Amino acid sequence: MTQAESYLDPKDIKRLSVLQPWRTASALVLDWAVIVLCIIAVEYTDSWLLYVPAVMVIGGRQHALGVLLHDFAHFRFVSNKHVSEWTADLFLAWPLLGTLEGYRRNHLGHHRYLNTDQDPDWKFKLGSREFTFPHDMKFAAFNLLGYFTLTSTARDFKKLYTRLSKDERATPSYRAIRLTYYVVILGAITWFGVWPEALLYWFVPYFTFFFMFMYIRSVADHFGPTMNYEDELQSTRTVMPHFGEAMFFSPHNINYHIEHHLYASVPFYNLPELQRLLMKHPEYARRAHFTHGFVTGLWREIVRPKGAGTPEQSLAPAE
């Protein structure tokens, strides 16, 4: 029996791992509905004051779509693989300019070889300035500002898609279907003359808030000078968000990251219950790395206060 298996009764894990496809489908529909409603609200009011928060919300829902893709990568939708794969690509991966298969190969390698030289995320991010902690206040601020000047976005975009493309194993027919998908969408945008709207409501939030939220969440999952990468309960962080934070930084319960790494078969909608059961185990409750708040607790863990000196920086793996 592994250490993880000792925390819970196998019957509980089996029960929590039962798929409820309607819950994933509802989450997917709701995410897209919020994006559409934001667009309608701004267009109806014609208000630039409303546009800024709308872009933030849309970026948060794009992040939510990426988190749902994470569940699909773990085969947590339906047992019919054909339906699951095409749903993920058409409504999650392709709109975010990625593919399910490319993400899955990278992410499952991360789970299998967590915090080792064979972990693709560890190898890719280890030693980069943005993933070396603690950050001084000035670097942290300019790094986040870079998502609005597009400097940080360009860095992350290049690294992310270079990495995931290496894991792509697409067939010629798949490539043709994906190309057709983009041609049809771009053709429709051109035909209806809505390029300004496409840029304002999809690409602006995508290249600003989406990438910023993704970065913050990837830091929250595994990074910081307080992490202990030799301990399964200390090498991953669970963040308990304050009011409103989950909508942007941890949609669909992705903040329960220790729990996810211990029991990856549990779909996102059962992670809160999984944690409640785990908290009854004294060792888990005592030793698991919990942080309260993204803009409070996480910030304090990864950013060195001004004037606090220059302690030795620690390197950490990626999500």
Image: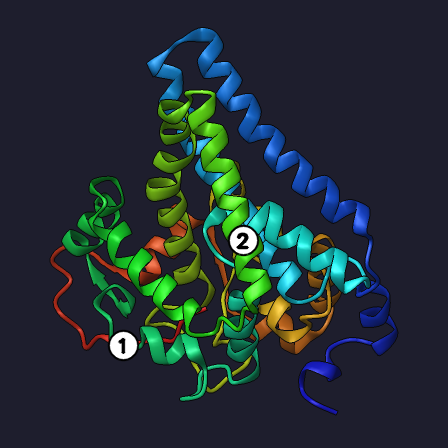
Compared with 223, 195 (above or below) is above
| Relative image position of residue 24 (x, y in whole percent) | 73, 48
Q: Which mark is residue 165?
A: none
The residue singled out by tag 2 in the image is 178
**Residue 4 appears in view:** yes
| Relative image position of residue 18 (x, y in whole percent) | 84, 62
| Relative image position of residue 112 (x, y in whole percent) | 57, 83
Sequence-wise, which precedes: disc 1 or disc 2? 2
Based on the displayed image, in which of its 4 quarters is residue 69 positioned?
bottom right
**Residue 182 falls left or right of residue 282:** left
Nearer the camera: disc 1 or disc 2:
2
| Relative image position of residue 306 (x, y in whole percent) | 14, 55
**Residue pictured at 35% horizontal, 23% vertical:** 196
**Residue pictured at 21% horizontal, 67% vertical:** 129
Compared with 165, 193 (above or below) is above
Based on the displayed image, in which of its 4 quarters is residue 194 positioned?
top left
Q: Quadrant of the N terminus?
A: bottom right
**Residue pictured at 48% horizontal, 40% vertical:** 60
Amino acid at the residue labelled 2: Arg
Pick out the residue farthest to the bottom: 1
Compared with 275, 29 (above or below) is above
Tag 2 secondary structure: helix
Q: Which mark is residue 314?
A: 1
How crowded pointer 2 is (Cα within 10 Å; few <14, some 14-19, many 20+) is rated as: some
Alpha carbon separation for disc pair 1 and 2:
41 Å
